[in-house]
Image (cartoon, rainbow, N blue to C red):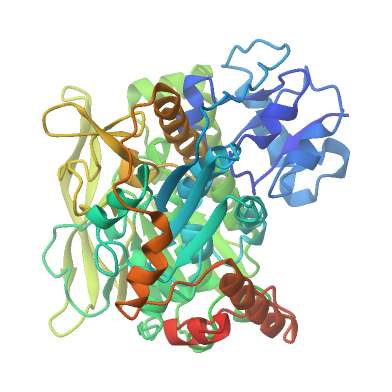
Amino acid sequence: MTFVITRPCCNDASCVSVCPVNCIHPTPEEPEFRTAEMLYIDPETCIDCGACVDACPVGAIFPDDELAEEDEPYLRLNADYYLDHEVDAGEPKPVRTPKLPEGEVHVAVVGAGPAAFYATEELVRHPSVHVDMFDRLPTPYGLVRAGVAPDHSATKSVERTFSSTARKKNFQYCLGVTVGEDITHDELTERYHAVVYASGASTDKRLGVDGESLPGSVAATDFVAWYNGHPDHADDAFDFSSARAVIVGNGNVALDVARILLTDPDDLASTDIAEHALDALRSSAVREVVILGRRSIADGAYTNSEFLSMRLVDGVDVVIDADDLELGDELARQVSEGSVDSTIGSKVRLAREYADHGAQGADKRFVFRYLTAPTRILGEDRVTGVRVVRNTFDADAGRIVPTEETSDIATGLVIRSIGYRGVAVDGLPFDDAAGVVPNDAGRVVGDDGVHVPGHYVAGWLKRGASGGIGTNRFCGQETASSLIADIIAGSLPAPTGSRDDVAGLLASRGVEPIDSTGWAAIDKAERDAGRASGRPRRKIVTVDGLRAAAGG
């Protein structure tokens, strides 16, 4: 028997550190880790000890003889990884915690998502390092709460890791506080030895085509926040009167949106989806979701596990036209010979299986169209369709180019899902083209190319809007390591004020931070309300409601 990693894998590598034979890859020390879709267990070297099962924060690891039928494809995905990746089995390197100089160090972490928590987890291992975590919302966990799809409850289990960090004596929440408005960047730097910004990438990218601003053309960032109960979007409204919706984009978020649109609302009713979204989806007329990808199936940005999960949605067919699976001569040759990377090879194989299987007569369907790009959103007063162009491979140019073939897709709802983008932070340099704060392993780098003492970034603001929970762990830990090294080197600036007066400063401005006790009260209120209706939680979706639940 061997163990197998399945779909909920969050890539946070907790399993890697406990494996006695180094049979889980890629490890954080390997280059592939930063871009890996998931982690994989080598069936040839696994010794069946089960240590990884207990360590996995999202319950993604199972014995191969206990796999559910829908998870059996992961046997092959795990094995395929080792066909084209040579790894060394052996004892993992021991993790050594460096000794810090005497004296307390106060750190402000701005943001409460995965990268913020993984950086904090490393920092609070040291009793002398005290972390205050700020977030403008009254709730923590960032995109784990407001971005992970409601039907992916296992992925949300990573919150247990975060709550463990938040229980440390040298940690405290300062939620419901907007840095830059309620308290300035300069006021933080005056009161803390270091400030770590991990506030994410909060805006969406645009298509740049005519008609994009018409009613009915929306950003996936807004739609996802709406169905996840984000307070900024609780009052949003979406028109589901059209039988077809079109999603532009080929990432995991695009697939999440597609599933939410077509999953039976009775099934969603057992999740933590926002109540207002559930009510709206019950009256939806959408029966087909077309997912457009500008490039080929090999360039799909969604993971194989998410691609696999599309066939698990009850009552929905997955439809792919075999003609849309063109790869180009060179890649087609590599796939045929089996010399292409296993992740790409598996994605192509899965798509071909979908194409061969065809529609089975279900009432609803996902339609994947590759090498298809929007050129215009159609309509006058609101969206009525999308004009698309067929793309093809140009071997001479070495890229994909548009053809003369165009067509129109009738729809009343177009959702663009082509990525997130960071926004500038007052007091920090910003690379507008890349949407990131210039940095060196998390240390902020000024316009003069020199590190800005006491200033750090983590997560999407540090590296751009790419990668999931596991990538954020590596990213957050890297930033924390840089900060710890600077503490040891004595290079952090000494505060001119005290963090003890932050509460008084905020109170003088009419701002009441929500601390750990307040968040615990919100969490209990939501879980109690959910329990009454057989759900994990029933989210409170307004700031006033959240503050009331916190006791403020």
x then y, percent, for residue 372: 28, 50
The image shows residue 381, relative to residue 306, as above or below, that is: below
Identify the residue at image location x=63%, y=52%: 169
x then y, percent, for residue 491: 33, 27
Count of marks overlaid on the render: 0
x then y, percent, for residue 125: 61, 38
- Asked whether 163 or 310 is in front, the reply is 163
Q: Relative to 382, is 102 on the left or the right?
A: right
The image shows residue 133, relative to residue 279, as above or below, that is: above
Q: Relative to 509, is 551 on the left or the right?
A: right
- Asked whether 122 or 130 is in front, the reply is 130
Identify the residue at image location x=53%, y=82%: 540
- Asked whether 199 or 155 is in front, the reply is 199
Identify the residue at image location x=35%, y=85%: 237
Q: Quadrant of residue 455?
A: top left
The image shows residue 408, relative to residue 491, as above or below, that is: below
- Asked whether 16 or 351 is in front, the reply is 16
- Which quadrant holds the N terminus? top right
Q: Is residue 398 visible?
A: yes
Q: Quadrant of residue 487?
A: top left
Q: Quadrant of residue 273?
A: bottom right
Identify the residue at image location x=51%, y=62%: 173
Q: Is residue 272 visible?
A: no
x then y, percent, for residue 218: 28, 71
